[in-house]
Each structure stands twice: as C-alpha cells, then as structure tokens.
Amino acid sequence: DAVILPPDPSFGQTSGTIEMRFTATEATQAQKYFLASRESNGFDGGGHVDIYLKNSRGFVEWETTSASFLVKTDQIVGLNTKTHVAVVYGDAGGFKLYADGVLAQTGAIPGDLSGNDEPWLLGASQARSNDGVADRNVDPFAGTIHEFSLYNAQLSETDVAALASLDSSPGSGGGGGVNLAPTPVDDSGFSVVEGTDLVIPISTLLANDTDPNGDPLLLDSVTGAAIVGTD
C-alpha cells in the first residue's frame, strides 16, 4: 500500500537531497512503477517531482511552473536486491542523480521543491490528484521501500556514497542514521565604527549554516577571516 506524508512547509526546500532505499520484486517494462511522488494535475506553482522505475532503470521527472525535465540512470535495477537512490537538487551544486552511491546523471535543471504544497506519496503516483491531496493514486510500486529521507542540504558525493554503503535493516544503524557533515556558508557584510570592537553573536554566524541530520550546530573556530577597512 502507498504511504501518504501530509503536506508540511519543511518539504518546500530550495535546495537539498532526496534519498531512498528500496527492493523491487517485479520487472518493469514500459509500465512506470512509482517510488515517490509529490505533485498534482498540472504544473501549478512548480516544484513537482516524481521518482519511478521504467524498463528496469530509475527515472526522476521534475516540473517547474511551465516545463518538465527528465533524467534517468543507465544502471539496471535488479530484482530482489536493495537499491539506493539519491537526488541532489538546487542551484548551488546543480542537479545530481546517484544510483548505489555512484553519480549517474548531472545537469543544470532549474528545479527545487518550493512552490509545491502537495503531500509526499510513497509507492505510487499522485500526478492525477487534486491540489493538496493524494486522492487519485496510480502506477503502484511492486516491492518494498525500506527508507525515505529528506535533507535540507545538498549532500556531497562522499556523503551519498556513505549512505549507499549502509544497510537499512532494523538494528543495522543504516540509512538516515549516519552522521553527515554540516554545510557551512561564509559570513560577510559586517561593519563597525573605527576604534570600536566588532562583536558578532554566535547565533548570527551559524544562522546560514545547516546540518543535514538536523543536529544543533556549535561554533568550533573562526578561520580565514578577511578584514577590509576604509577611512
């Protein structure tokens, strides 16, 4: 049976990573078997995405407000064996599709998940559904979805490979349990009156940094500071 994750504002990231681990039990030919779907009938506000199997390969279809983009893996998805897929999206690092930890496709796809208020549907397509609900679900996946994770950062190739190498079986410590490195962003734009101290709260320095696991961030050190003064 398909699983519905109700709409949530946290789903609408402008950049991030979608990660899945699954086992297919039925060969796919021309029929699409959907792993995950977050869309509805029409383009709407954009940010629609579908992940599915067809002809034993993995596909990702992304919709903006007016166009669709399709990428696929060349790797054959085997039957009765766990397969790991990761989709990295957002302008900063471009679009990347990984299969079992190996980069399968990359490109400048102008896609993110903002503008989309739909639920996530796991195990079927909601492309024909009305807005905001998964009420017309079709093309179900034949197999088991072991894991589905959303990260609010673009995972590196090293991070994806580490996730792919893990087993998501209960008690194995696999899947989203791996502790991934935070994503730091340089800070700039601070100013101070000549002859006075510049005091920057730690919370300000960490405000634009993210942790893929959602763990609290702590300041360890400040390096590479560039100080430019004007009279």
Image (cartoon, rainbow, N blue to C red):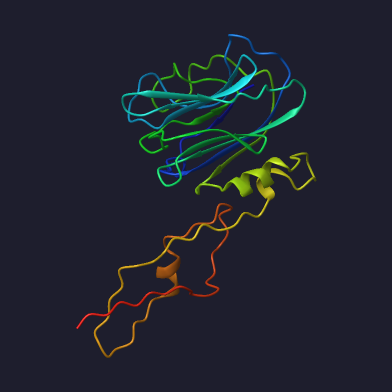
The picture places residue 16, in percent across and down from the top left corner, at 49, 44
Q: Which residue is rendered at x = 44% and y = 60% of the image? A: 185
* Residue at the left extreme of this rendering: 231
The picture places residue 163, in percent across and down from the top left corner, at 67, 44
Q: Choose top left, top right, bottom left or bottom right for residue 214.
A: bottom right
Left or right placement of residue 204 versus residue 217 in this view: left
Number of numbered discs present?
0
* Residue at the top extreme of this rendering: 30
Left or right placement of residue 214 versus residue 107 in this view: right
Q: Which part of the image, by quadrant, shows the N terminus?
A: top right
Q: Choose top left, top right, bottom left or bottom right for residue 150.
A: top right
**Looking at the image, residue 34 lies above or below residue 198:** above
Q: Which residue is rendered at x = 52% and y = 37% of the image? A: 96
Q: Which residue is rendered at x = 39% and y = 23% of the image? A: 68
**Looking at the image, residue 37 lies above or below residue 56:** below
Left or right placement of residue 82 versus residue 75 in this view: right
Left or right placement of residue 62 versus residue 57 in this view: left
The picture places residue 86, in percent across and down from the top left corner, at 59, 37
